[in-house]
Amino acid sequence: MVNLNELIILKFSALFLAVSLLWFCRWSVPFLRGTDGRLDGWRHLLLLRTVNYFLFFGLLKAMVTWSIFPELSLTLNYFQAILYEDFLNLAIILSYLGFFLYQEYRLALPCRPGQREFATYLLQYGYYWLLVVNIITFIRIDYFYLSLLPENWSWWSRFSTESLVMLLFVGLQFLWLWLRNLRMSEVDPEVQSLVNETAAQFGLTIKKVRIWHLKGVINAFATGIFSKKIFLTESLVAVATPTELRMVVGHECAHFKKRHLEIRTLVLLIIVGIGFWLSEKYPSYEELILVSFGLGGFLFFQWIIRNQEYAADELSGHQLGDLNQMADALQGLFGLTRLPSRFDRVIGLFLGHPDLESRLKRLRNL
């Protein structure tokens, strides 16, 4: 029988193995080095992210398999034993994610030469992983901690406790949003007027427009299902002509007009729901289902997003002028980035945005 110290050593050994594999992936992938430096960089970055998904969930599996709860419960009560183990698991998971995000940041520097601050990168790309950790924490609390509530509690006491857990879940997300907003500022009146006029042509009202101070990133983001918001990076506003900026804003308005955000949310919930249903119905194949269905669901979700990008390009071009203007705007802004104009077919399957050549070809041929 494995004792407590050996279990703890196994947990940290799993962490060491995971970060070592990430480090190896970060520094030695000679077979990806070709003649196109920009494409090689994105291939390498995609490989790192793909390896990370397997390592992250493998590390989660190791944390659950090598549980120290049975040993701790010999000297501590049930609640304390679970709490101590979860603090240890959380520290290991956060340490791994911090290491991964730093390696990803270092690898992305050649692709985004203007983005030198790790804190900026963390605020931009760490949000997704905070959401993942938050969901895992919520599931853990729901399955283990709430089951400890006394059976003689009234329904109101149970409802209040579960509501507090849900508020904690939502509150952590809003905390990260608040931190991210520290990197944002109000737009100039000219830009605000351009956004309002463009949105009006789509029959929309944009509640908030903000400048996101992401150095070296030329992009725009649409967010919000009930309260529509558009974020423009400072680099985009600095280099785009009024026509280019208008077309980019039109692209984001097209996402709202076609309800793309609602569709993404619904599809994601269906994928996650089916995955959980299959894993509960066939528990002996749980790991196989999580890996295969997870990968398949991810590729399907990315395919939907790519088609939404094509549709937004088309609607923006039709609504604001013509498709050639939209194509010219994409081509003009793309020339100022370090992105490759074309991705390999396999790489394209994993990306949510089509490459420039595919988008231009689609627009020119419509």
Image (cartoon, rainbow, N blue to C red):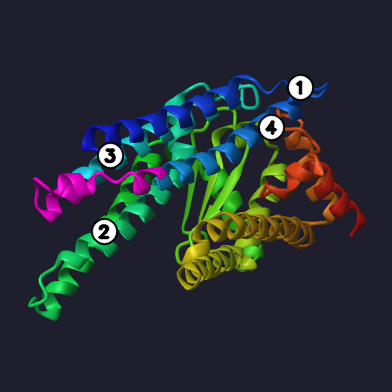
In the displayed orientation, state which residue is furthest to the bottom.
155
What amino acid is at disc 2? Answer: Ile
Q: Earlier in the sequence, mark 4 or mark 3?
A: 3
Q: Could you tell me which residue is drawn at 41 percent across and 34 percent down?
A: 14
- Nearer the viewer's eye, disc 4 or disc 2? 2
Q: Judge left or right: residue 99 versus residue 176.
A: right
Q: Nearer the viewer, mark 2 or mark 3?
A: 3
Give the residue number, with chain letter if any, for mark 1.
Answer: 33
For disc 3, the neighbor class at 10 Å (few under 14, some 14 to 19, many from 20) is few
Q: Are marks 3 and 1 in contact (CB under 8 Å)?
A: no
Q: Residues within 10 Å of mark 1 (few under 14, many from 20)?
A: few
Q: Is residue 242 above or below residue 305?
A: above
Q: Earlier in the sequence, mark 2 or mark 1?
A: 1
- In this view, the residue in front, 247 or 108, is 108
Question: Which mark is first along the chain, 1 or 3?
Answer: 3
Image location of residue 144, percent across then percent down: 24, 61
Residue, disc 4: 42
- Measuring from the top left, give residue 260's x and y in whole percent: 61, 64
Judging by the rendered image, the residue that carries numbered circle 3 is 2
- Please give the residue where the numbered disc 2 appears in the rendered image: 141
Q: Is residue 363 visible?
A: yes
Camera-side residue of 77 and 364: 77
Q: Is residue 64 magenta?
A: yes
- Please report whichever mark, 2 or 3, sits nearer to the chain's N-terminal start: 3
Secondary structure at numbered mark 1: loop
SS for dot 4:
helix
Name the residue located 62 percent from the left edge and 27 percent from the top edge: 112
